[in-house]
Image (cartoon, rainbow, N blue to C red):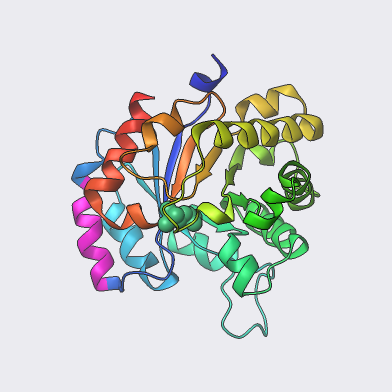
Amino acid sequence: MDKLNRKAIIAGNWKMNKTASEAAVLIDELIPAVKDAGCEVVICTPYTSLVTAVEKTKGTNIHVGAENVHFEDHGAFTGEISASMLTDLGVEYVVIGHSERRQYFAETDQTVNKRTLAALNGGLKVILCVGESLTQREEGVTEELVRMQVKIALQGVTAEQMANLVIAYEPVWAIGTGRTATADQAEEVCAQIRKVVGELYGEAVAKATTVQYGGSMNAKNAEELLSKPDVDGGLIGGASLKAPDFAAIVAAATNG
Ligand code: 13P
């Protein structure tokens, strides 16, 4: 059972939600709700809530992540945040290549690769997002596209660094739409992702790499999605903003 040997990770991606004061309230609710988790629990918050999140989660089982990172370490990049700024705060994870960044902020496979390298070299754990649009799925290019996204993002990443990298399969058409991929659709692409990792780094790394599904995952559908052999966790948007819903997904990962 390869799946049992991998780290199941449930990560919340808060996106552009919650002020720091509101984050404090949500974290206070989350701490008791997920304290018995049998999986790794991560909350990825806006930059402005990171200090609060790190402080509040000290001594708990909740890990904190950012939602993006710049690829340079410092310098004249107005408005950007570097890996060393995040690790200095005690931030452990970072989401890279989310489809909203690709869609609205001109993120490309090449900049995703640069951010991934900067984050890993800077000591962060990376949640790397890939996934196809509805048009691309209808055109039948999901597999080729996701393979390409993974291969470009991982250029220059070593086999050892793969221990600090999680891949999240997030079909764009399922994000925030309430239209979840079926468990079989999620499994098919997550298995493909693992296959590409195997081609690049060998069987052992492929078997050890956590692959998450994201896109309208909620308290109701989490168990079925997480029961699939290649779905090792979830990247949760909307449902991560409500403590009982997020806790239910964490419990589903614990049971699955
Ligand atoms: P929703 O769970 O709101 O569909 O968002 C998924 C997502 O984009 C997580 O990164």
Residue 41: x and y, percent?
Answer: 38, 42
Residue 165: x and y, percent?
Answer: 61, 43
Q: In which image quadrant can residue 122 be found?
A: bottom right
91 is higher (above) or lower (below) than 219: below
Q: In which image quadrant can residue 79 be found?
A: bottom right
Answer whether residue 27 is magenta in the image: yes
Question: Can residue 198 be seen by looking at this rendering?
Answer: yes
Asked if residue 33 lies left or right of residue 81, the reply is left
Residue 60: x and y, percent?
Answer: 28, 44
Q: Residue at x 33, y 52 (%)?
A: 239
Answer whether residue 204 is magenta in the image: no
Q: Residue at x 39, y 73 (%)?
A: 48
**Which contiguous range is marked in magenta?**
21-31
Q: Quadrant of the C terminus?
A: top left
78 is higher (above) or lower (below) than 43: below
Query: Residue furthest toward the front?
Result: 138
Magenta stretch: helix, strand or loop mostly: helix
Question: Can residue 232 be seen by looking at this rendering?
Answer: no
Q: Residue at x 80, y 49 (%)?
A: 155
Asked if residue 27 lies left or right of residue 225, the reply is left
Q: Quadrant of the N terminus?
A: top right
203 is higher (above) or lower (below) than 80: above
Question: Looking at the image, which is closer to me, 213 or 53?
Answer: 213
Q: Residue at x 57, y 18 (%)?
A: 2
Residue 160: x and y, percent?
Answer: 70, 36
Q: How many marks?
A: 0
